[in-house]
Image: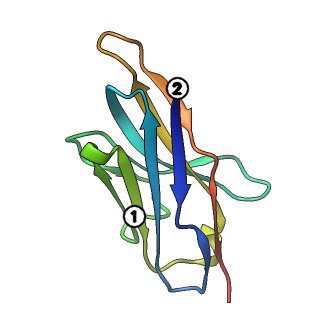
Amino acid sequence: QVQLVESGGGLVQPGESLRVSCAASGTIFSINPMGWYRQAPGKQRELVAIKTSGGSPNYSDSVKGRFTISRDIAKNTVYLQMNSLKPEDTAVYYCYAVVVTAFGASPRAYWGQGTQVTVSS
């Protein structure tokens, strides 16, 4: 069994920064890719940023230049540094990972429980 646990959400003012983290635990052989989605009230879940191991990250147009995704492969952890936050960034942020639990096993997608990010003055 694999668990994704997010941390670091909270309430910030517009223009401020926040970093959220997600650590994967359990039986893990490899994780690829790993990233972040978000869901605002009344809206569909959308991709924020995602990164393959050794590859370039992909960002949604709405966060390019403001958010940075990074991974610590050894720690099975992904981070999302969010700068210049805007009220429209308010959402529940979900960690996403495609995990292989053993050599030769099929990859399976996992989601974290979500962490609330609120940007408001």
Q: Residue at x 65, y 68 (%)?
A: 90
Q: Residue at x 60, y 86 (%)?
A: 13
Amino acid type for the residue under numbered disc 1: Lys
Residue at the disc numbered 1? 64
The answer to which of 74 and 120 lies nearer the viewer is: 74
Q: Residue at x 25, y 44 (%)?
A: 74
Residue at the disc numbered 2? 1
Amino acid type for the residue under numbered disc 2: Gln
Say which element carries label 1. Answer: loop
In the current view of this chain or complex, which residue is farthest to the front?
Answer: 26
Q: Quadrant of the C terminus?
A: bottom right
- x, y percentage for residue 119? 63, 78
Name the image colouring: rainbow
Q: How many marks?
A: 2
Q: Is residue 10 left or right of residue 81?
A: right
Q: Residues within 10 Å of mark 2 (few under 14, many from 20)?
A: few
In the current view of this chain or complex, which residue is farthest to the bottom?
Answer: 121
Residue 46 to residue 115: above or below: above
- x, y percentage for residue 86? 57, 77
The answer to which of 62 and 119 lies nearer the viewer is: 119
Q: Is residue 99 left or right of residue 30?
A: right
In the current view of this chain or complex, which residue is farthest to the top?
Answer: 104
* Distance between the alpha carbons at the discs numbered 1 and 2: 33 Å
